[in-house]
Amino acid sequence: MSASAVFKPSRIDGRRLRSERTKQLIIEAYLALLRERPTTPVPTAAEIAQRAGYSVRSVFERFPDLHTLRVAAADYGLAHAAALAPARDVDADRPTRIKSQVETRAGTCERGVALWRALTFNVDEDDALKARLRFARTRTMERLEIMYQPELSTLAETDRRNMLITLEALTDMESWARMREMHGLSFAEACAVWIRAIDRMLPPTPPQA
Amino acid sequence: MPVEPSHVSDTSIKKPMRIDGRRLRSERTKQLIIEAYLALADAFSPRVPTAAEIAEKAGYSVRSVFERFPDILTLQIAAVDYAMAQVTALAPPNELEGDRAMRIRSQVRARAQVCERWLPLWRSLIVNQGNSEELKDRIRGSRERVMGRLEAMYQPELETVAEGERRQLVIALEALTDVESWARMREFFDLSFDEACLAWIQAIDRLLPRSATDP
């Protein structure tokens, strides 16, 4: 085996790593621009490139168009949301579970609303985005089911489904954004709105829980 | 009273009528352009139709469109005002005086009909508001009207709680009955109109406190 054959794989890995790192920085630049300007969720390639510290050509070498970048950002955002929002206090009493679920969801909304808008505003153009939005909503519903399992278990199937649908509507990203942007509520005040509403909406907790 | 012919020329008699006729035609043209915009925005939602598409739909030239509306944003604003006036005018009456169950049912069905009818235009407005303060004001105004309606409908229940809690409940009710909440029930969860109404009715009934007159 020649010396070049021994060294070649590690050179390729280094390149790949650098390329992945560049992709990562471009995605992060895109997300940072979204957060800074949540009502204009379409940063240009030039803006993204400048923010990431690369050329526009470098952006388009990694992402052939801005849709591909948006989809990659969605995957990155979903992975981040999952990592930063594990289910906590699943077996706790009712007030603790409600508080825990609300604060976790509020954190996700606070961090994710800019990206969420960028996805929902462009969803009709791309089925890949639709699939990711569906996945995000399904995950929210699953979390609600886990957190409120004792209360939901007391309901008939249709009522349980309706309850989950309306809990998801109540705790939607845009519902959070309106409390913060339109009603001018603080993080804690907005959490209090959700906590009170969920406590009212949920049926009584069964005694064995 | 008849006008004295010796003091007023023929042209001065006819002139005001000619100006009125022109103004009427111009207003009619504006109206048709707005209606064309709304029809296309509804069909293409959330994409904003182009000036050429609007002109073709209205049966005028692109120049005619821009003579009445200096840019598409001005047309969008006029169209939103027109649509919102229609929403108010066409909204089914609410049963303010009925018992709790009747009021909830009435409010939900009225809201559901508005959401069903106006979803594409609302979506287009939300997506295309950009940095326009005029469009943002109209979105805010629309939400405030919905909240005002909720407060009026559920006044007997809301007056049983303190002001802070009342505000929280109205915010939660507005979130629950948002246009996109309705859209998700219909598009994502595939519920029928009546099934979606039932989900809202159940949730509102749980959310609202009992009033003094409730059984």
Image (spheres, coloured by chain):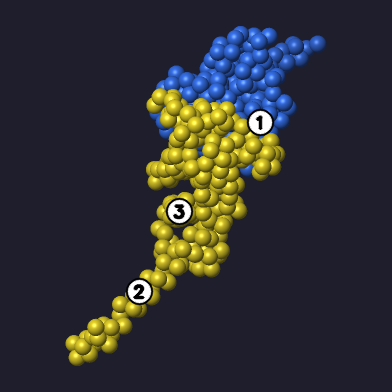
Q: Is residue B83 above or below residue B154?
A: below
* Residue at horizontal 65 percent and vertical 18 percent from the top: A151
Q: Amino acid at mark 3?
A: Ala
Residue corresponding to mark 1: A162
Q: Residue furthest left?
A: B7
Are there few (<14), some (14-19), or many (20+) residues within 10 Å of tag 3? Answer: few
Q: Is residue B201 left or right of residue B22?
A: right
**Mark 3: secondary structure:** helix
Q: Nearer the viewer, residue B33 or A80?
A: B33
Instruction: List the residue tagged with mark 3.
Output: B85
Q: Nearer the viewer, mark 1 or mark 2?
A: 1
Q: Which residue is mark 2?
A: B20
**In the structure shown, which secondary structural element does the residue marked by tag 2 occupy?**
helix
Quadrant assignment for the N terminus of chain A: top right
Label 1 SS:
helix
Chain B's colour? yellow
Could you tell me the amino acid type at mark 2?
Asp
The chain displayed blue equals A
Is B101 or A108 nearer to us in this picture? B101
- Relative to A75, residue A99 above or below: above
Q: Give me the C-alpha separation between circle 3 and circle 1.
A: 32 Å
| Marks 3 and 2, how far apart at CA | 25 Å
Badge 1: how crowded within 10 Å, few (<14), some, or many (20+)?
A: many
Q: Amino acid at mark 1?
A: Asn
